[in-house]
Amino acid sequence: MDTTAAGPTIRPHPTRDGVQVVDPIQETQFAFLTPASVTLTPCDTDRFCFPADTGATVHTDTVETAYTSAVWVRDPDGTLVGEVTDKGTKSVPPGSYSLGLTATQINVQLAVDGALTIEMMDNRTRITAPDAEVIHVGARSVHDQPAGTVTTTDDPGDVMAALSTLGSALKTTSCERSFPTLRGHPPLVERGSELSVPDGIEPPDTGVTIRVPRTFEYIYPVAPLAYYLGATVESDAAPALVTDGWEYPLNAAGDFETTVARVLKQVFLLDCVTRTEGYYQNPLAERRTVEEAVDLDFAALYDRPLAAQLEAYLDVPFEAVADAVPKWKLTADVRPEAEYVSALPFLAEELAVVRCPSQRLRAGEGAGEQSELVESFLRDQYPRASPASRGQLRGGTGGRPSRSSVSQTAENTVVRPEAADSIEQAYVGEGVPVNASKMTVDAYYRRLEFTPSAEPQIRVVVVCNDEAMTDENVVSDIYGTREWFQFDIVVEEQLTTDELRETLRRDADLLHYIGHVDDEGIRCPDGYLDATELETVNVSAFLLNACDSYDQGRALIEAGAMGGIATMADIINEAATSVGRTVAKLLNQGFPLAATVEIIKEYEQIGHHYLAIGDGSTSIVENTSGTPNRIMVERCDDRQFDMSLFGYPTLNAPMGTMFTPQLPGVSEFHLNSGEMGTYRVSDDEILGLIDRQDVPLELDGTLQWGSEVTEL
């Protein structure tokens, strides 16, 4: 029984005794186990404490999560009456309760009438209502569509007015907007012949204004801040953040863009701390760090309006709280030109740091200089012998240098953005970025236009078009090794041009291509398929693991793909095979494309030859912890280790999400971006943690995988 066709679907699990919750838009799944097979009937979503898109009544008295999840128990008024965030058992007396769960790929709630027993185990959380005959399950998609489209001319004043509407998407102007589910997707911004703002799209009354000069170099960087603060953007020669009777200069750090980034980070951090006085009074590690450094009354701040909070927050020097600021997910360099204004709502949604690379961006003029720019960068990152001297290339040139994909057109001019202190770095504009993802506005729009499949299966197609590269076919055994997700893995070899064209036309979540790319296109046994000639591609994401595959990858994006990984230089078979396996493992664990590229840059010999194209936030499956994470381990003695976790926010677990490691005695939460705590643990505790989830693990300077580690 499907309770809904449009939003999340709640149904009996197709292969287990239990319930499966599926969000077809985000292609995410969540499961509850039950003692026996169950029947479901629709239920009213008003039963739940927080909004739900759909609800179902499950005829059972016990549900069990497929992995560990913290649980919050609230009464009908929303008051927190109990929580289980660490291993153990908690009982709640008879009553009417709404239960919220963490680490779910879909926002899931339970409603129960009766007494409760909640038991958190090593790899399960069990909820039992012994006197109840049914448990109600509610689900809400985290996918959020823009409320409309604002049209602007190329006049800077009109662009300011358009960006002033971004905050209309905020579902609250309290500090709880630091929770990603309470922010909403900003309205789209498109170019037209006149400024036009649809009815109902207007900035909230926060009393906050951002004043900047009338040039795109100043306007674009404040877009995410205007969104997060619900602020209007107005013209003034001196950039400043203004409330009634208060003004904060936006060049306080000696640099406009640096100051804007610091304000965004500081306000976001202190909102996350202040919100612990509200609905979720969880022990937050960042609060402990901040309280040791500053004298702020967070209980009093919680009830104050946004403008007053802002004034109190920014009275604190940034240096005082810098150690508590989470590592930022994304820095985006956007060309300060009118044609790229449409990218700003998407960057604002991710709270990106936006920079306008007028002087910092180095570009090659002629083909020779462009090629040298790429080669000099790769030499810096990869100071070894040339690829041709060390092994067989994945190009079709027999060792000759392949054509430079960066010297053909203006679009292929090489640009090298200044390095950023963020997890991911992106570039929006004309040219091929070195050491950054190439984002496109069209790919962002496809995120919204995505049509979900009627089937919840995740379809992966592995294509190997060279017999000498079949060692990489093992990736077909990597994809789909997720117990609670349904996969359809297809392996194809030696596809002809017609067969590959047809494969690209079929719906698939991922194409993993192994083979050659030459001047003429993607090599097939009967010739070449030139992706620039394709009109339609229905593959959502791809890896083109071949030499110099950027042009073909960009063509796949232009033909309909959402995002992909390609190369911008020659690559060697052995090293590329290693990259292919690592990429498969990361994507299979829910890492987005851009984060995957950042990790292979750090650990793979030729990682810097790869870049993400299109929408770098694209992922093919969700992580069972909610936030994909990497573990770094340092030995202290024979049985003791210092273990730290590093989080990678995603579209389903954006910045502001909370995370806690499933370690004995650990109940403190962290913000989910960057380092999430360091712990002194035993070898058994680490092995227990990685046994529950196959995470990437850095041990003795090398990247390993939890499923492959049996002893430390």
Image: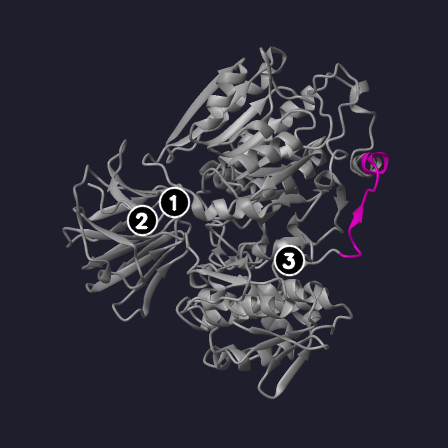
Instruction: Give the mark, 3 or 1, whose residue is nearer the N terminus.
Output: 1
Query: Which picture quadrant has residue 400?
Result: top right
Compare marks 2 and 1 and give the one earlier in the sequence.
2
Q: Which residue is mark 2?
A: 7
User: Which class describes the residues within 10 Å of circle 3: few (<14), some (14-19), or many (20+)?
Assistant: some
Pick whichever, 492 or 203, lies toward us: 203
Work out which quarter of the rendered image holds the N terminus and state it: top left
Q: Position of residue 570 (x, y in %)?
A: 73, 26
Label of residue 338 in the image: 3
Q: Is residue 303 above or below residue 274?
A: below
* Residue lying farthest to the front in this orientation: 193
Q: Amino acid at mark 1?
A: Ile
Query: Circle 1: is it few (<14), some (14-19), or many (20+) Cα within 10 Å?
Result: many
> What residue appears at the point 50 percent right and 40 percent down from the top-left corner?
619
Specify the farthest residue to the bottom. Answer: 245
Which stretch did the figure color magenta?
358-371
Tag in front: 3 or 1: 3
Answer yes or no: is residue 693 visible.
yes
Q: Secondary structure at mark 1?
A: loop
Could you say where residue 116 lies in the image, as x and y percent from the top left? 24, 57
**Residue 369 falls in image quadrant:** top right
CB atoms of marks 2 and 1 within 8 Å: yes
- 3 or 2: tag closer to the N-terminus: 2
Q: Amino acid at mark 2?
A: Gly
Q: Which mark is residue 443?
A: none
State the residue at coordinates (76%, 51%): 418
Q: Say which residue label 1 marks.
A: 25
Q: Which SS class for mark 3? A: helix
